[in-house]
Image: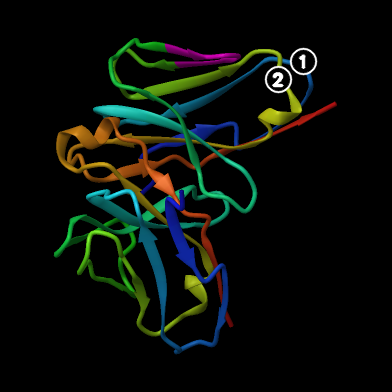
Amino acid sequence: NAGVTQTPKFQVLKTGQSMTLQCAQDMNHEYMSWYRQDPGMGLRLIHYSVGAGITDQGEVPNGYNVSRSTTEDFPLRLLSAAPSQTSVYFCASSYRSGTGVGRSPLHFGNGTRLTVT
Amino acid sequence: TQLLEQSPQFLSIQEGENLTVYCNSSSVFSSLQWYRQEPGEGPVLLVTVVTGGEVKKLKRLTFQFGDARKDSSLHITAAQPGDTGLYLCAGYTGTASKLTFGTGTRLQVTL
């Protein structure tokens, strides 16, 4: 009954360091996405994937890379961390992409709180 | 550019009061969802509305989708401390794969 699992829960990086935020789901969902949440800004879409091997950019993709080699996993890579990337990052998945996704709820992980100093 | 603006940003009320949260946009949405988020957790879906003018009720929560599908409201009757949390609206526009979230309304209900 795991749902969407994100690791780590907390991370502190120095400017310029790189790291990967992990996201795994066990619901066989086609669609996966990454959001960042900042105070007063709601959730902003970074990257998303409609299936294995397919990724696309969201609203704020700069400084982040993703890949989707399996249905289950969707890691988010920070190439060279900057203080502006200090945020809470959420991974979410839903049943399917396409016209049906509008009625499919997004299932969220519990987030990774990242601080870049 | 934030497509979805929510108001108010913050709301602090006493148990038993009624409240309404608004979600507005200049864009037309094919469907709109409302989520609630508690501290340290991810958002959890409350409801999805898809038809202009649609009204859905979830116990003391009433959700309405505007006739033109550009806005929505969430009304809570007789608020309880358990309603405390961050309420987020989110809508699908154009490309069905991108869900855009609103700015959020933080609600606190005290005894």
> Badge 2 is on which residue?
B79
- Give SS at disc 1: loop
Report the amino acid beneath label 2.
Ala
Q: CA distance from mark 1 to mark 2?
A: 5 Å
Q: Are marks 1 and 2 in contact (CB under 8 Å)?
A: yes
User: Residue placed at 74% from the left, 16% from the top?
Assistant: B17
- Give SS at disc 2: loop
Q: Position of residue A43 (x, y in %)?
A: 45, 50
Q: Is residue A43 above or below residue B34?
A: below
Pick the front one: A70 or A38 = A70
Pick the front one: A92 or B91 = A92
User: Residue placed at 49% from the left, 42% from the top?
Assistant: B103
Report the amino acid beneath label 1.
Gly
- Looking at the figure, which quarter contains the C terminus of chain A? bottom right
> Badge 1 is on which residue?
B16
Q: Chain of mark 1?
A: B
Q: Left or right: B13 with respect to A63?
A: right
